[in-house]
Each structure stands twice: as structure tokens, then as C-alpha cells.
């Protein structure tokens, strides 16, 4: 049987063990509390950083995207002299302006006179546009029927208020205009044949007729009111009638439109898109 001394010693050791366990539990609680505090601080800091840097549909992300956009396009600066036919055309010539399958994009448009059309000499056109004046030289020796049609449409006011609906900046560098509908399929209500030759090539400054290839039923040309201005590279087959040229000051205005890019609306075929910088004709006058 334990003595009083032994009982006191046992009680003392038991108390010491209890005190040690209490101290260990208190230490664990302090460590846990510190850990939770650190986690909360990190979480709060992360949340503040996210809220101050995240983009929910605009702001800095757009600026970053803009600053990392594609490199500026390369545009040749040398204006190419207009081509010459390997053999001159008869003078005068007769043109054929056939009714097209689609009605005119502007009501009341009439086809031009088709007989006795001169194939010599030039005419000057001034296109007043929102980007500035475009001075155009029309060359009858290259495409008399195209020149005759362009002059007729200009005198009818067909091009007034019409925009340029498509620009290409890679591969084929050109600005396409002349469709009042802005869709790329509008025309004057008539069509006429190509005026090309096998050796024809294209270069900066050329005006050429846009077309939809040969008509599948008749095998004839599909030229109408649409044309394009070549401001840079244009590795094209000789299927587009060249009928004039744009002066250097006008080309510089087109260069700025090209550098502004496009919306890609016509990619992948035929390529390019609506110009980001709008081009709209106010009037076209013939000297």
C-alpha cells in the first residue's frame, strides 16, 4: 500500500503530465491559428490582384491585342506604266451591252451607246471621295467599251454615294469599288465582254474591271459597274480589262486605307474584307 509520500509524488507527476499536454494543445492551436491567418491573407491578396487585373470584355486586353497586332503591310512604291496592246484596236469599235440576269443596283440606270465607240485618246475623271480627290485617267486604247461604260455611269450619277466594299492587303493588293449594294454582287443591269490580251499584266496604279468570270450559259463576259484599283502587288491572270490609272496622290490615299486593314468579311474567298477606313464616292465628274 502506497504511503502518503508516494501518493503525493504520483499526484505531482500526474499534474505535470496534464500541464505538458495542455501546453502542447495550446501550441498546436497557436500554430493552426497562424496558418489560417496566412492562408486568408494570401487568398485576400490574390483576390484583390485578380479584381484589379482581370478583364471582363474590354480595357487593357484590347490594348494589348492592338499592340501585338500583325506587322504593317508592305506596299510597293513604284507606279507601273500602263500596258500597251500588242496590236491596236480598230477605230471606232462596236460594244455589246447585254441585259444581265440581275436588275440594276440603282433604279433607272441605262446601258450606254454601243455603236461607233472611239478606241483612241484619253479622258480624265475626278472622283470626289470622303478620303480626298482621286484623279483618274481613262485610256480608250486599252478598253474602249469599259471606258465608255464608266463615263456613262458617272454621267448618270450611278457612282454618287457608292462605297468601296472590299480591299485586299495580302497577295492581291487592290481596292474594289462600284457596287451600290455594297455586297459585291450588285451591277448596272447590263454586262459586257472582256477587253484583254494574253500578255497583259497588272501593277500599282492600274484601274481594271472586276468580273465574275465567263457566264456559264453564254460563255460571254460579266463586266458591269465594279472595278478595282491596284495599289500594290497583283499577280493575276490576264482576265481583267485594264481601262485606266490613278495618280500618285490618289494612290497615297489608298495606301492609308490599306494600312488601316479590313474586317475579313470576304475571307477565305475571294479574300480580303470591308475596309476599316471607309471609302465612299461623293461624285464622279468627267473632264
Image: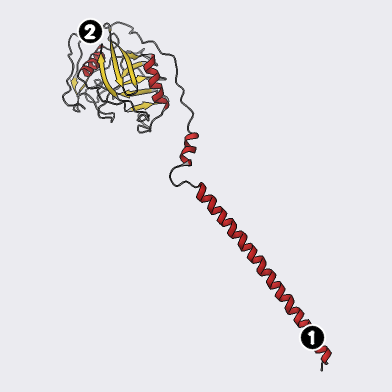
Question: Does residue 107 sit above or below 41 in this rendering?
Answer: above
Q: Nearer the viewer, residue 279 or 79?
A: 279
Name the outermost residue toward the bottom.
Answer: 1
Q: Which residue is at a point 58% across and 60% down the rendered structure image?
A: 40
Residue at point 36%, 29% (across, down): 275
Image coordinates of residue 39 in percent, x first then y, are: 60, 59
Picture coordinates of residue 156 (x, y %)? 19, 19
Residue 275 in sight here: yes
Residue matched to label 2? 118
Where's the N terminus, which quadrant?
Answer: bottom right
Q: Residue at x 65, y 69 (%)?
A: 29
**Residue shown at the point (78%, 82%) measured from the top left:** 13
Task: Judge from the rendering whether residue 65 lies leftward or rightward of residue 84; answer left or right.
Answer: right
Q: Quadrant of the C terminus?
A: top left
Query: In this rendering, is residue 113 above or below 274?
Result: above
Q: Nearer the viewer, mark 2 or mark 1?
A: 1
Badge 1 is on which residue?
A: 10
Q: CA distance from mark 2 to mark 1?
A: 131 Å
Q: Could you say which is closer to the camera, residue 40 or residue 85?
A: 40
Q: Is residue 155 left or right of residue 208?
A: left
Mark 2, secondary structure of its residue: loop
In the rendered image of this protein, does residue 189 appear above or below residue 20?
A: above
> Picture quarter containing residue 262?
top left
Render colour scheme: secondary structure
Q: Position of residue 64 (x, y in %)?
A: 49, 38
Label 1: which secondary element = helix
Amino acid at each position: 500500500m502506497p504511503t502518503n509520500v508516494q501518493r503525493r509524488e504520483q499526484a505531482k507527476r500526474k499534474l505535470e503530465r496534464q500541464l505538458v499536454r495542455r501546453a502542447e494543445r495550446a501550441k498546436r492551436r497557436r500554430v493552426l491559428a497562424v496558418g489560417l491567418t496566412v492562408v486568408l491573407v494570401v487568398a485576400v491578396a490574390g483576390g484583390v490582384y485578380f479584381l484589379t487585373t482581370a478583364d471582363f470584355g474590354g480595357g487593357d486586353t484590347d490594348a494589348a491585342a492592338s499592340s501585338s497586332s500583325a506587322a504593317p503591310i508592305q506596299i510597293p512604291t513604284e507606279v507601273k506604266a500602263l500596258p500597251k496592246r500588242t496590236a491596236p484596236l480598230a477605230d471606232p469599235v462596236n460594244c455589246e451591252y447585254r441585259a444581265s440576269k440581275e436588275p440594276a443596283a440603282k433604279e433607272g440606270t441605262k446601258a450606254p451607246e454601243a455603236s461607233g465607240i472611239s478606241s483612241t485618246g484619253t479622258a480624265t475623271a475626278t472622283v470626289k471621295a470622303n478620303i480626298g480627290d482621286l484623279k483618274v485617267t481613262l485610256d480608250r486604247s486599252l478598253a474602249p467599251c469599259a471606258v465608255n461604260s464608266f463615263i456613262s455611269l458617272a454621267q448618270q450619277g450611278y457612282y454618287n454615294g457608292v462605297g468601296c466594299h472590299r480591299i485586299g492587303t495580302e497577295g492581291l493588293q487592290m481596292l474594289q469599288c462600284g457596287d451600290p449594294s455594297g455586297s459585291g454582287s450588285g451591277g448596272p443591269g447590263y454586262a459586257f465582254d472582256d477587253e484583254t490580251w494574253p500578255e497583259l499584266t497588272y501593277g500599282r496604279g492600274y484601274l481594271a474591271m472586276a468580273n465574275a468570270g465567263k457566264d456559264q450559259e453564254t460563255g460571254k463576259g460579266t463586266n458591269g459597274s465594279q472595278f478595282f484599283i491596284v495599289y500594290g502587288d497583283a499577280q493575276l491572270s490576264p482576265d481583267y480589262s485594264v481601262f485606266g490609272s490613278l495618280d500618285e496622290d490618289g494612290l497615297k490615299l489608298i495606301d492609308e486605307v490599306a494600312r488601316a486593314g479590313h474586317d475579313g468579311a470576304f475571307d477565305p474567298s475571294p479574300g480580303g474584307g470591308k475596309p476599316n477606313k471607309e471609302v465612299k464616292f461623293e461624285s464622279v465628274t468627267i473632264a
